[in-house]
Image: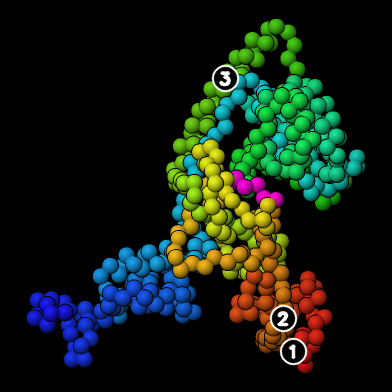
Amino acid sequence: MEEVKRGSKPDFVLSDDEILRFGTRLCVPNDEDLRRELLEEAHCSKFAIHPGGTKMYKDLRQNYWWSGMKRDIAQFVAQCLVCQQVKAEHQRPAGSLQPLAIPEWKWEHITMDFVIGLPRTLGGNNAIWVIVDRLTKSAHFLPMKVNFSLDRLASLYVKEIVRMHGVPVSIVSDRDPRFTSRFWHSLQKALGTKLSFSTAFHPQTDGQSERVIQVLEDFESLYFGPARKCRSPICWNDVGERKLLGPELVQLTVEKVALIKERLKAAQSRHKSYADHRRRDLEFEVGDHVFLKVSPMKSVMRFGRKGKLSPRFVGPFEILERVGTLAYKVALPPSLSKVHNVFHVSTLRKYIYDPSHVVELEPIQIFEDLTYEEVPVQIVDVMDKVLRHAVVKLVKVQWSNHSIREATWELEEEMREKHPQLFQDSGMSSLED
């Protein structure tokens, strides 16, 4: 202050009422509570709506100045709990590509998955069990019913796979309850097969099955036209391999397998170089806290707009252990006890700690697949929107996980059709009156 009075700091001006300014900007004293209150008002108020660090700095620097102002703003925004839970990430996906090892021989390492939700065939089947060889990419498409017992599935597996190709060394699959059941584990243990499951909500682990299923569904869609009867084309359930007989064919098979392995290695290397260009490395330490990525159920009404108002991450949760190079075991609360607690790094976001955070139990009911449902809670208002040639009846709806302030206007006709229980309340009749 004395230097300002002597004029040795020409950029600073001391007014007659002892107010210090930097140019035309007000100098904020070195008071942590005062500066934090100013930052909260500029970031958390209903007029500011949680701007980013650059926008917030440009707004504040018009009227205020203090030493290290830009650094303090960046740190405050990074530590904001609401921003960490709600704002989308605009960085490249985390985690480099880690291809599975190339198998040494055909049908030693396989992948499998189910295709459900299909129309019922004349034989009563409404699902397909897709089993793919990781080396030759040949596949079996086994017609089945979704309610097949585990005994029936085991019998089908032995008859169609083990009988023709022998016992595989390993099986890669998702965490379908049929694959994670005690019976399936016991069967594969007795056969000497290792089970490898995908990490939670990271289907790319079994990307080969997903890709084969995509091709299968294309053909199924073409085959089951609107004017066709539902006749299953799965009579061609063995694709890509036939029995090889004769000693001269054994040598041919060995040569073909060597060629396949060489080309798979080149394809994997090329794919990894392309994929890693669009990804970034991200690592956590044991004891760090992270958020889990969640999403609203797409079948819920108003997902397109309403879902965007919802948190994209829940937590924070503590990291217990690193599993492999790109997965982490996370300490989940009792409400998520049925969720597998190992997650790929791409589904995690680092939690930046701040002593002022009061992290409450997440009010959203998260399902086992890390989705949550948004349902209408009540109708808070009604309105007739007058158009040029019609009058449209609207209702203002409050949704679960949101306050009345975030209620949205919906078409009354649609709400009556999908949620008639809302209109049975006495509150609605009083609004209409």
Badge 3 crowding class, 10 Å Cα cut-off, few under 14, some 14 to 19, many 20 or more, is few
The answer to whether the residues at label 2 and label 1 have Cβ atoms under 8 Å apart is yes
- The residue beneath circle 3 is 259
What secondary structure is the stretch in magenta mostly built from? loop
97 and 222: which one is in front? Answer: 97
x and y percentages locating residue 180 in the rendered image: 73, 40
Cα separation between marks 2 and 1: 9 Å
x and y percentages locating residue 152 in the rendered image: 86, 35
Name the image quarter holding the N terminus.
bottom left
Q: Amino acid at mark 3?
A: Leu
User: Can you tell which mark lies on residue 379?
Assistant: 2
Residue displayed at 73% across by 43% down: 176
Start-end of magenta stretch? 338-343
Pair 2/3: label in front: 2
Cα separation between marks 3 and 1: 74 Å
177 and 116: which one is in front? Answer: 177
- The residue beneath circle 1 is 431
Give the side of residue 102 with respect to residue 181, left or right.
left
Q: Amino acid at mark 1?
A: Leu
Badge 1 crowding class, 10 Å Cα cut-off, few under 14, some 14 to 19, many 20 or more, is few
**Was residue 344 drawn as part of the magenta stretch in this picture?**
no
Residue displayed at 65% across by 38% down: 197
